[in-house]
Amino acid sequence: MSAADPTTTEAWARLDALATSYEPDLRTTLTPEWVDRHTLTAADLHVDLSKNLVDGDVEAALLALAEQVDVAGRRDAMLAGEHINVTEDRAVLHTALRMPADATLVVDGQDVVADVHEVLDRVYAFAERVRSGEWTGVTGKRIETVVNIGIGGSDLGPVMAYEALEPYRQDGLECRFISNIDPTDAGQTLSGLDPETTLFIVSSKTFGTLETLTNARLCRAWLLEHLPSGADRDAAVAQHFVAVSTALDKVADFGIDPDNAFGFWDWVGGRYSMDSAIGLSLVVAVGPERFAELLAGFHAMDEHFRTAPPESNVPLRMGLLNVWYTNFLDAHTHAVLPYAQLLHRFPAYLQQLTMESNGKGVRWDGEAVGYDTGEVFWGEPGTNGQHAFYQLIHQGTRLVPADFIAFARPAYDLTDRTDDGEVDVHELLLANFLAQTRALALGRTADEVRAEGVADELVPARTFPGNRPTTSIMAPALTPSVLGQLIALYEHITFVQGAVWGIDSFDQWGVELGKQLAQELRPAISGDASVAAEQDPSTQSLIRYYQENRGR
Ligand code: F6P
């Protein structure tokens, strides 16, 4: 498949022309009809696109662009299991991970849905044994803590969802997560744990990741050292270590019983894997039923993306808006601002999903792109961000498109009893959610500021330009299903952008060089002068600084 250069399409030229003359004015754009037309539904998500910086001509040209680069064709190729990850010659089938058990999808002669459900059933059965106390540690005690050892896609999804679904967790079972090679992470996470009641899940697609294998060995040594003397060492590893990986041979080499290993497939990218067996820690925490609801939520969004017409296809529309901002209005970043404390790890999760996927400088046919790709995604929960970085979004010189996410029902329903009466605290949160997008869209003119009695010399500093684009996403509540829908929404937004840009959103060669160099120069840090001498002067100087200050 050759990659279309999007800049050669008629639609791209049209968007270029439109961007030159486009003058946003959300104060006049935001009519009830406009809001109506720009309020879309995808599964349980209520998505208000009306406060974005587009007009009808821009929207038509964006949809034409999608058509001219054949986003739908590429989507269908992905869903059918074609090898659209060309640099790794792999299918891209995370959508198969959430297809119902009675569906069939034959890829390369194999029904992948049957494979998915076979593993899922084992994952569910294992999780139930841990949750019920039937699965015990080697000394016969019930498991109370599950430690997931993994990094990147083998960590960020499970930890994000574990936090997001906190109200659904089983009491008496805690999950902890070790990812960083910084020994502080393992040191802190293991601190205070009882080895007799701790179960480790080593999660690694490749089972070759330095951080994960190092941490797994540290945890194994810690377990064996701290279990009561007399505990059978082999049995201890078998009872306290399970693994999730595509490389089951390497799992066995590590000493983990193959019966306690859960597989997945090379057609699941690491950052798209939290709904595979990589979600095992989450299944233990919230139970198979809730995990199945999460998968159903993913699937509902997949179906929306597959079947909704372009005008009402939310991932398509949001992906195209991101292209508009990136390539025509010169935005470089994109903020994701959940007004839900439970989603506090969601921006970090999205950083890997979006930036590892679309941070590419060549198209899938190897040609250099001549246009910007992958924005920097970032964010924090509201209202914390309001008191930190929103200043720049409101009055700074940069355009920062932002997604605001909120839920009608609170996870914790608390009332503040003041002298003036009772205040529903969730309503305070929602008032902020609404106020921010309104302020960003409409701003405050100099005349309005003056009318408030502000002294003339302070008027410029207190004026808000407005026309700062936002999308508001709401849902009834942060349920497992809604979380699945949200994640799948962003997966497909990412896909749309990658398809327009003609890049392979499913490889990640950019992380390899650093890994290789770290292996090569490690002996220099430990004192190998000949390896140190091969390094550039800056690296040599930093190594010397380390050696002088290591303190041993
Ligand atoms: O180095 C990047 C990466 O390959 C990610 O894509 C992946 O999610 C992470 O490392 C962890 O990889 P693994 O699951 O194979 O340990």
Image: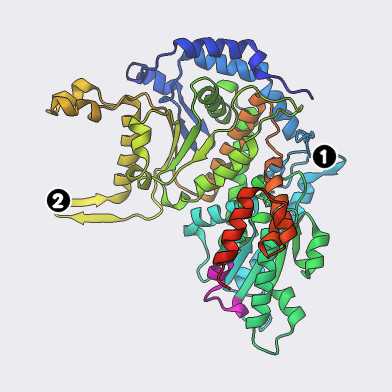
Q: Report, in whole angstroms, how far the alpha carbon at label 2 lies from the one at label 1.
A: 64 Å
Among the 4 quarters of the image, the one containing residue 227: bottom right
Q: Quadrant of the N terminus?
A: top right
Q: Amino acid at mark 1?
A: Val
Of label 2 and label 1, which has the lower sequence position? Answer: 1
Give the labeled residue for mark 2.
420
In this rendered view, identify the residue nearer to me: 267 or 219. 219
Q: Position of residue 437 (x, y in %)?
A: 36, 32
- At x 75% / y 79%, what residue is drawn? 235
Instruction: Tell me if residue 253 is in the magenta stretch.
Output: no
| Span of residues in magenta | 186-197
Disc 2 crowd, CA 10 A, few/some/many (<14, 14-19, 20+): few
Q: Quadrant of the C terminus?
A: bottom right
Disc 1 crowd, CA 10 A, few/some/many (<14, 14-19, 20+): few
Q: Position of residue 532 (x, y in %)?
A: 70, 56
Report whether 415 appears left or right of 456.
Answer: right
What secondary structure is marked by label 1? strand
- At x 18% / y 29%, what residue is drawn? 458
Give the labeled residue for mark 1.
106
Q: Amino acid at mark 2?
A: Asp
